[in-house]
Amino acid sequence: MDLTDFRTPELDALAQEIIPARHFEFSTETARDRFFNDTRMLDAKQWVHNAFRTNPQSMLDHMIGNLALTGTEDLLDLGCGNAFILEGLRPHFAEGTITGLDIAPAVLEAAAQRLRGTATPCRWIEGSADDLSMLGDNAFDRVMANYMIHYVPDLDRCFTEVRRVMRDGGIFQLTTDRTDSMLEMYQVHFAALKAMNAPEDLFKASPKGRLSLTNGGQLLGKHFDQVETVVWQDQLRFTDPEPFMAFYQVGHNHCCASSEPDARLTDGFFHELRDRVRTQVLEAIADAGYFAVTKYTGSFLCR
Ligand SMILES: C[S@@+](CC[C@H](N)C(=O)[O-])C[C@H]1O[C@@H](n2cnc3c(N)ncnc32)[C@H](O)[C@@H]1O
């Protein structure tokens, strides 16, 4: 039995029942000006994913396995955020180079600070992943786009550009989720929304539906000779509701309900929403000993 295959048939059935086909969509501008104009959202997610995970293989271990690094690669990270992933990978290609590109200056600055003073040369570029015109042909051995592709306006242009800047024999790793990843968070969120008769348009899945682990292979297959999918699951377990509440509120903007200003949704609305979510989390902790949030994520490895 694989102890890291957290998805039981019961969870699969629940996902069918609660995850809507419709998903949120956000622009690059929303990402730059609202979500990543500081590092709070990234900090909340990264802390909780690390502190509460139960898979002994971390997301970084998964990526280290995928990237087959030999130590001297030139690596480009599209939407590098605060370089949390780059910091973990860097010792595995310490004699190579890092190029981090991101649309949001605030997180790019945090990335530069995080890797400041390391021996691996770093270059930080502010820009959009679908315009790599500042980069030469055949310049990189590895290209990554982790948890960011759903924000990129022109996906075909982005993948054509990745093909151009990547050397023969290189690997492009695109990491994303299934839209039913973390379904227990959506379950308590949707139950609370329902009890509050909330607007119908809030009942939507994660924005990663735009290019998810389920539908991404088809689009990537148009641009790359080989597309392999490597799944990586985890289960976060909480015995105290507060870290989960921070993850839900700050890390996920209440499952996207507070992502953009909406005159219908007052502070009082979100206060009640959180109270209702917290109550369900406490009930799960009382029943099962912990509240579980099951991640279903993975990477496309394109060659
Ligand atoms: C969820 S974060 C992921 C950060 C990092 N890859 C990680 O996995 O830790 C998404 C990142 O994509 C960036 N982003 C959004 N739209 C972008 C675009 N069109 N081009 C480049 N970066 C973009 C955001 O600023 C943010 O840093």
Image: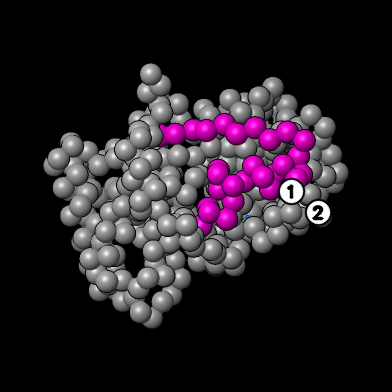
Q: Is residue 211 visible?
A: yes
Q: Height in image: 123 above or below 303?
A: below
Q: Height in image: 79 above or below 273?
A: above
Label number found at residue 138:
none
Start-end of magenta stretch: 207-235
> Disc 1 and disc 2: Cα gap in Å?
16 Å
Identify which residue is drawn at 35% across, 79% down.
264
Label number found at residue 134:
2
In the image, farthest residue toward the left? 286
Q: Is residue 77 visible?
A: no
Is the C-beta of the residue carrying label 2 under 8 Å from the nearest atom of ligand 1?
no
Q: Is residue 284 magenta?
A: no
Give the mark nearest the N terminus, 1 or 2: 2
Label number found at residue 159:
1
- Figure quadrant of the C terminus: top right
Q: Position of residue 149 (x, y in %)?
A: 61, 51
Q: Which is in the foreground here, disc 1 or disc 2?
A: 1
- Disc 1 crowd rating (10 Å Cα; few below 14, some 14-19, many 20+) is some
- Figure quadrant of the N terminus: top left
Judge by depth and name the residue closer to the eye, 110 or 71: 71
Identify which residue is drawn at 39% across, 48% down.
16
Looking at the image, what colour scheme do you see? one colour
* SS state under label 2: loop
Q: Position of residue 13 (x, y in %)?
A: 35, 43
Q: Height in image: 13 above or below 22?
A: above
- Disc 2 crowd rating (10 Å Cα; few below 14, some 14-19, many 20+) is few
Judge by depth and name the residue closer to the eye, 151 or 136: 151
95 relative to 39 in the view: left or right? right
